[in-house]
Image (tube, helix red, strand yellow):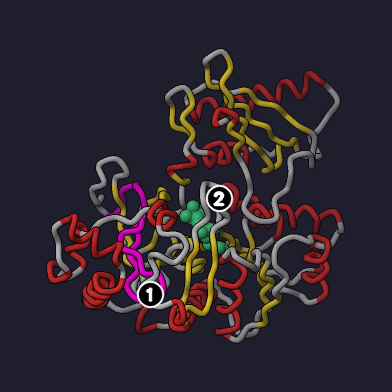
Amino acid sequence: MIWNEYIECMSRDERANLQSERLRKMVERLYSNVPFYRKKFQEAGISPTDIKGIEDLPKLPFTYKQDLRDNYPFGLFAVPQSEIVRIHASSGTTGKQTVVGYTRKDLDMWSECVARALTSVGVSKKDIVQVGYGYGLFTGGFGLHYGVEKIGASVIPISGGNTHRQVQMMQDLKSTTLACTPSYALYLAEALKEKNALDSLKLQRGIFGAEPWTEEMRSQIQQKLNIKAFDIYGLSEIMGPGVSCECEHQCGMHIAEDHFIAEIIDPVTLQPLPWGEVGELVFTTITKEGLPLLRYRTRDLTSITIEKCECGRTTARMFKCKGRTDDMLIIRGVNVFPTQVESVLCEMREVSPHYQLIVDNKNNLDTLEVHVEVDEQFFSDEIRQMEMLSKKIKSQIEKTLGISVIVKLVEPKTIERSEGKSKRVIDKRQK
Ligand code: DLL
């Protein structure tokens, strides 16, 4: 099923015209309403009339998270505060928190995008959707919530955490769809298994995002919960969940391109890259009223294809995010993404997908310790057996990363479980 066939399946030329028209209007509005952008245009020596269409995107300045921080809280808003009907905020874990605002029309557009996303993974009004993303300043809970209501499915706004209750609701109310972070889905799978509850469920699918997760992790979740696991992407600065989402073919996330123009750039040269190449994802919003942003640098690394999907949608698809440029660890000069380690661990049946990376610097040498839980079935007090397993994992990870690592096997259920976004890396060097 396709929620908005006209928009989601229009020809790429038709969509490009729509984007160009919306971009021109957006640029004019930003120039008139947001002093920050007017100044940026003047500094770059461009005027709104220089932007004739999407081919002129590279002329526009980038927007950075720091710009939101510098103009905290409402400095980049393009409407008077009285037009703002909802505010969300980032957690501020990587610096000063940022605030985003939505007008009534922005919220309608957001629920439209989430309705498209839910429909693309097979949710219909017959479904019961358990929203286990946090409700509050985080965009996950409310974002999913209004999309579910829009398509007329039943929403269980349980929010994140309270695992015992999640299990009970899933059993009693027969939830068909679970929306939460992939790491929390794994935690729930564990809790369901412990309670012998898996067979009594009616769960068919999960809609997981808000953090990077690998194809190997997808297989684990699908197998443990006996569902299809779909990837949904978004970020609060651009909107929240629903900027893009997979369809039933699980082959890349369809971007809501009538609202957001995506580019992939080389994070070093800042030059746009051709479709298919991996680089940093950049978004320009073309319909937002409250907080429109030009060429916002997401820091997420991925690639995009514009090939038509088997589902019939013609929208560009972005592939699973490899990670964020700011989550990339540089260990003894080598670039390491936590997802690379995850891919290796999820392929090994002797360990469970619960892991943590501890980075330190000892005697002027960076060290990477991989802590991973041994699967209950394989855990043993036999030191030699565990040593052999540890060696096997170490060699696989070293082959993938190209650097030496220390592997520490830990007992089942000893790594802290996450109820929202997981914390995979503890970098002790940053002190
Ligand atoms: O995480 C919005 C969201 C909620 C998306 C629920 C999906 C589901 P922020 O807290 O602003 O917003 O964090 C945005 O999270 O730049 C990515 O680094 C990461 N992220 C979001 N979705 C995915 C995904 C929400 N599917 C940041 N895969 C983004 C990988 C993701 N990373």
The relative height of residue 335 versus residue 353 in the rendered view (above or below) is above
Quarter of the image where one finds residue 144: bottom right
- Where disc 1 sits, the SS reads loop
Q: Is mark 2 within 8 Å of ligand 1?
A: yes
Residue 244: horizontal and vertical position, in percent? 45, 66
The number of callouts visible is 2
Q: Give the magenta part as a residue range.
A: 275-296
Residue drawn at (66%, 39%), measured in percent from left and top?
Answer: 355
Amino acid type at mark 1: Lys
Residue 110: horizontal and vertical position, in percent? 48, 76
Give the camera-side residue of 337 and 200: 337
Residue drawn at (71%, 41%), measured in percent from left and top?
Answer: 352
The tag earlier along the polypeptide, 1 or 2, is 2
Per the rendering, the mark at residue 288 is 1
User: Label 2, on which residue?
Assistant: 213
| Screen quadrant of the C terminus | top right
- Relative to 55, 6 lies left or right: right
Whether pointer 1 and pointer 2 mark residues with C-beta atoms closer than 8 Å, the reply is no
Q: Main secondary structure of the magenta part?
A: loop
Can residue 12 be seen?
A: no
Residue 152: horizontal and vertical position, in percent? 60, 86
